[in-house]
Image (cartoon, coloured by chain):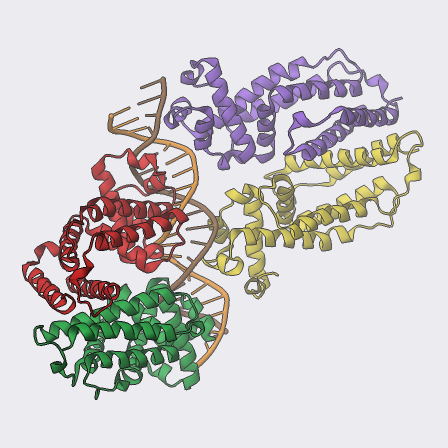
Chain colours: A yellow, B purple, C red, D green, E orange, F brown
Amino acid sequence: MTPPTFNNLDETKQKRILNAALQEFAENGYEQASTNQIVKHAGIGKGMLFYYFKSKKELYQYLIDYAINIMTKEFLSLIDVSEPDFIDRLRQIASVKLKFFNENPSVTNFIGSVYLADEVKLPVHLQKQLTDLQSYGYSMLYENIDPTLFRDDINVDKAFRLIRWSIEGYQNELTNEFKGKQIASVDLDPYWEEFYEYLDVLKTSFYK
Amino acid sequence: MTPPTFNNLDETKQKRILNAALQEFAENGYEQASTNQIVKHAGIGKGMLFYYFKSKKELYQYLIDYAINIMTKEFLSLIDVSEPDFIDRLRQIASVKLKFFNENPSVTNFIGSVYLADEVKLPVHLQKQLTDLQSYGYSMLYENIDPTLFRDDINVDKAFRLIRWSIEGYQNELTNEFKGKQIASVDLDPYWEEFYEYLDVLKTSFYK
Amino acid sequence: MTPPTFNNLDETKQKRILNAALQEFAENGYEQASTNQIVKHAGIGKGMLFYYFKSKKELYQYLIDYAINIMTKEFLSLIDVSEPDFIDRLRQIASVKLKFFNENPSVTNFIGSVYLADEVKLPVHLQKQLTDLQSYGYSMLYENIDPTLFRDDINVDKAFRLIRWSIEGYQNELTNEFKGKQIASVDLDPYWEEFYEYLDVLKTSFYK
Amino acid sequence: MTPPTFNNLDETKQKRILNAALQEFAENGYEQASTNQIVKHAGIGKGMLFYYFKSKKELYQYLIDYAINIMTKEFLSLIDVSEPDFIDRLRQIASVKLKFFNENPSVTNFIGSVYLADEVKLPVHLQKQLTDLQSYGYSMLYENIDPTLFRDDINVDKAFRLIRWSIEGYQNELTNEFKGKQIASVDLDPYWEEFYEYLDVLKTSFYK
DNA sequence: GATGAATGAGCCTTCATTCAT
DNA sequence: TATGAATGAAGGCTCATTCAT
């Protein structure tokens, strides 16, 4: 399924190529991404990319598959589902997510661009994997949550979603703010503090 | 600042060109948009586009400027700021926004794609205008709001933002759902109903 | 059907492009023909070829159509079918053919390469035209021929074909011999003389 | 002259490589032939082909040399020159030729494509060998022929050639007809019968 | 000997931009 | 003003050939 010519490369080279490609696609979208730029940044010859992947599209689909796998293994599966408090769960997810982002910034940006753009008609098995990834993410989010913590006078499902949207909105705003900056160079502590304050407001409002 | 050659055109022709361009950019992004398609849909010769605008980029920036102006005049300025209830204000904004979208779908889609994509490095004056647009939007949102409606045990500013993010998240989800469909063909009533339910949950939770 | 952008060119330029293309395709076949070489020899910019023709394949098909038309009008239709003597008919055809070749060498070579190579899957209407061209050629060859000139002890149809094949073989041999030489620089008279001698042998053998 | 590295291979491997190459060149012509396909079909590594032959062109020329030799030894030298009747000689040659084709279809197709295409500028020694092959073929055709069988009122040399051209024309037509079909699946008897009828017409016409 | 990864020139094609008319 | 023909750089991709292993 995955190109054996590529998988036989030593890992650092694979990583160099994958990162160059993930970044190029994330920044420019599928069509506008330039394989020329990719090979230049990856430091490989013009022909090799097509020796490994046969076509731009195959490379793109390989990246999606790769991103899905790594997100599953190194992000979603690390979420602790024993925490029954929805908002504390969200806090923990944010922490794992940030760690993942720091280790795989290009993967995060790339998979985001895939969901946003849908420039490319993907084969069904990839469409399914993307949907599955989302479902798995939701299950990590909602599984084993204790609904009795919520006020009795509101619809809990609606509350779930409103809270999730709030958090996502907050995180998007931060992402936007940090865009272009080296994340490593930012002192994140004040942001965590602020985040916790937002979570407290949510608890106060939505919980009993 | 705006090309005088273009502004001297009779208005219907201007509209034809602008709409052709707005649509092309909204659908394909900056790089992928084709000037050939634009002139074809606008019904003008290839040379004229570059006579009016000098370059693809200048056209794009003109469109941003144009979109900002029209959104200011025909959307933001129509918001009724006499409504002091924050959540009722949001409801009213949603209604005005939908009306604007129905009358100017290409403008709405275009400006959305500009915020999302940031393919192009914009000149500072446009960056500023975009920020100003957002600020103006926020002022329409927050001006004259009665904070005393909110519970006393939460930070009202944080509540404002959490609520706004919730609503935006909900609206994004709908936008995504409607993508590709003819909006005119959708019966919106059930969505309004659902929207109001969400607003009620917010009121119950955040208000006294 | 034929690209209007190309047909609007002044004729000398059209000819320059057509000849460059006919030659390139005749010499190298469809796949190996280089559009780069064509534009270089035609003295036009790289993009123009695709402005006129949209694709290499469309150019190729245009050339086939063009070659068929010109061969029909300036070669086959000039054959005098009032001559009932089969071998004299062949003599006359050879003369017309040579004249045509001198005026349109690239067309002749091109259409020959098309029949030989069948590299490209042609659309049915072109397939049909090519077959029709051959049929028309045969009709010019056989129409109104007097079979009673042939000996009674042989099958006249078989004789027709044997004679045709002889002549074609002779002509192919000459074509091969002249390959690469400037045909204009060759004194053809001795070849005509030799040709007539061959025709005489055929008459002696196959006629009463 | 022939690469010693290649000649040291055991014969089955040589054959595998030669057949893979002959077929690829015969089917696609020189330029369009893919060395990748050749090594794949030959079951050898990419590097070895260029170890044995140094370049695609050298391989091609080796194949020409090889084809000439095998045609000489296993086709032309098998022609029975004791038959003094020209037309019976032709019949016998056709039979030997068909046998050879059945045993070496790739060689036959390859050498045919070489004569037709002349894509490649061959070195003089190969040009000469090709000419010699033809000469040798002609000598097998004409040697020991009894000219007194021919009518007295025609030039016998011209008759020889006319007859040869006829036969070649007939055979080309058949080759064309069979193109793409599995020759083994065709019942050839009716074609032999027809062939003999043509030969009879020729005898009746050209012999006393 | 043997492999196949690596290279880079060249392929067809698109497209913003210019310019003669 | 208005047209659209003309340009050439850049796009994705292929392939003979080389070379480290």
Q: Position of residue C78 (x, y in %)?
A: 18, 46
Could you tell whether D129 is left or right of D187 in the image?
A: left
Q: Quadrant of residue B82?
A: top right
* Number of marks in the rendered image: 0
Could you tell whether C136 is left or right of A199 in the image?
A: left
Quadrant for the N terminus of chain D, please.
bottom left
Choose between D68 and C167: the one closer to the eye: C167
Choose between F6 and D95: the one closer to the eye: D95
Q: Position of residue A139 (x, y in %)?
A: 80, 47
Res A65 visible: yes
| Residue at 35%, 77% in the rendered image | D101
Could you tell whether A12 is left or right of B97 in the image?
A: left
Q: Quadrant of residue D46?
A: bottom left
In the figure, B63 relative to B34: above or below?
Answer: above
Which residue is at the far top?
Answer: B82
Q: Quadrant of residue B183?
A: top right
| Residue at 90%, 34% in the rendered image | A207
Which residue is at the far bottom?
Answer: D82
Q: Position of residue D159 (x, y in %)?
A: 14, 72
In the figure, C17 relative to B11: above or below?
Answer: below
Q: Position of residue A112 (x, y in %)?
A: 65, 43
Could you tell whether B14 is left or right of C29 in the image?
A: right
Choose between D4 and D40: the one closer to the eye: D40
Res D61 visible: no
Choose between E10 and D88: the one closer to the eye: D88
In the figure, A168 relative to B206: above or below?
Answer: below
Quadrant for the C terminus of chain D, please.
bottom left
